[in-house]
Image: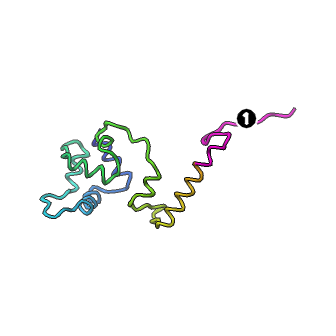
Amino acid sequence: MFPERLRALRKGQHLTLSDLAQDMNAEFNQEGQASKNTASQIGNWERGIRTPSYVEVQKLAKFFDVTMDYLTGLAENNTYDLAKLFISDKTLLFNGEALNSKDRYEIYQLISGYVHGMGGRTEKPGPQVHQEELDL
């Protein structure tokens, strides 16, 4: 399960093996770190040839913002709290453009208003099937 999930997460973010290795090295750069991540190392993980260490799985989970249980196949990642995403320090993009803090706040307010306004609706959001009456 781990190799498939790692590949799906990487490809979902349109990253090559080299891109992922470079990004992880940049994000988790520690002074005196003996080894850096390489494209071939990550490729071996994706093919199931090698198994990453606990520390490497932890770094991957943090990098992709998923749980280690999801990465290893012990849990499904079906939900994500948008509120946490908007208050996180992650860079948010929309159609390739970064959202500044004012945009993030306004979008958060729009979503919050939409969700809280759903309580007064008679119809639930989602696909609805309506059949019209014929007046004969």
Q: Residue at x 40, y 58 (%)?
A: 88
Q: Position of residue 3 (x, y in %)?
A: 28, 43
Residue 104 is left or right of residue 42, and the answer is right
Residue type at tag 1:
Gln
Q: Residue at x 26, y 58 (%)?
A: 24
Q: Position of residue 81 (x, y in %)?
A: 45, 48
Q: Which of the 4 quarters of the picture holds residue 69?
A: top left
What's drawn in magenta, residue-wise? 116-136
Q: Nearer the viewer, residue 113 or 98?
A: 113
Whether 103 is drawn above or below 9: the answer is below
Q: Local crowd at mark 1 within 10 Å, few (<14), some, or many (≥20)?
A: few
Q: Position of residue 91 (x, y in %)?
A: 40, 62
Majority secondary structure in the magenta region? loop
Q: Nearer the viewer, residue 68 or 117?
A: 117
Q: Residue furthest top?
A: 136
Number of on-image labels: 1
The C terminus: image quadrant: top right
Q: Which of the 4 quarters of the picture holds residue 33?
A: bottom left
The N terminus: image quadrant: top left
Q: Which of the 4 quarters of the picture holds residue 123?
A: top right
Residue 126 on the magenta segment: yes
Residue linked to disc 1: 131
Q: Nearer the viewer, residue 38 or 102?
A: 102
Q: Residue at x 31, y 47 (%)?
A: 7
Whether 68 is drawn above or below 86: the answer is above
Residue 89 is left or right of residue 130, and the answer is left
Whether 100 is drawn above or below 17: the answer is below
Q: Residue at x 31, y 54 (%)?
A: 63
